[in-house]
Image (cartoon, rainbow, N blue to C red):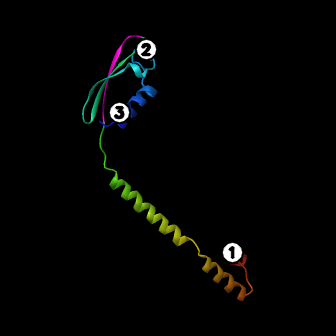
Amino acid sequence: MNIDALNWLINSILNWFRCHNCNSNVEKKNIDIKSVQWSSVLLDIFCENCKSHSMVKSEVLSVDLSKHLNILKNSLEKLEAKEKSLTISDEEIKKLDKDLKKDNLNVSDLFN
């Protein structure tokens, strides 16, 4: 287990864990790391309020996000292409304005 994952776990325990007997918060000094292995850690959490112990075992799973990131990237590229096809360039606006003026029309006439 890497140090970032262990720090995240301990901070999560400090924020969310409550004693199963008395519902008290836990303090960092009362978290005892019993065992650390490649992907898991075993913690003994002592409650100063009711003097009970809780054992917590946590495991870290490795997930390859590259496939999901590629799917997201492709979706964003398709969305950008679609947005570009829906926009009107400055040149197209100038040409439209020029063509409308030839016939003594304006943009509002297109919608009436």
Which residue in the protein does label 2 denote? 22
* Secondary structure category for the residue under label 3: helix
State the quadrant of the N terminus.
Answer: top left
Outermost residue, bottom side = 102
Viewed as shown, does residue 83 lie left or right of 98?
Answer: left
| Rendering quarter of residue 89 | bottom right
Distance from disc 3 to disc 2, alpha carbons, whole Å, reads 26 Å
Q: Which mark is residue 44?
A: none
* Residue 52 among those drawn in magenta: yes
Q: Quadrant of residue 38?
A: top left
Residue bearing the label numbered 1: 111
Indicate left or right for 51 with 84 as reference: left
Q: Residues within 10 Å of mark 2 (few under 14, many from 20)?
A: few
Element marked by disc 2:
loop
Q: Residue 34, how many percent across, how many down? A: 28, 23
Q: x, y percentage for residue 99?
A: 67, 86
In this rendering, the label closer to the viewer, 3 or 2: 3
Residue at 70%, 77% in the rendered image: 107
Q: Who's the residue at 41% across and 60% down the image? A: 73
User: Residue at the spot x=33%, y=55% of the render?
Assistant: 67
Please give the residue where the numbered disc 3 appears in the rendered image: 6
* Residue 57 falls within the magenta-colored stretch: yes
Comparing labels 3 and 1, the label whose residue is closer to the camera: 3
Q: CA distance from mark 3 to mark 1?
A: 63 Å
| Label 1: how many Cα within 10 Å (few below 14, some 14–19, many 20+) | few
* Residue ranking furthest to the top: 50
Taking depth in this image into account, of 21 and 53 the one nearest to the observer is 53
Magenta range is 50-59
Q: Is residue 62 above or below residue 10?
A: below
Q: Amino acid at mark 3?
A: Leu
Residue visible at 45% across and 20% down in the picture: 25
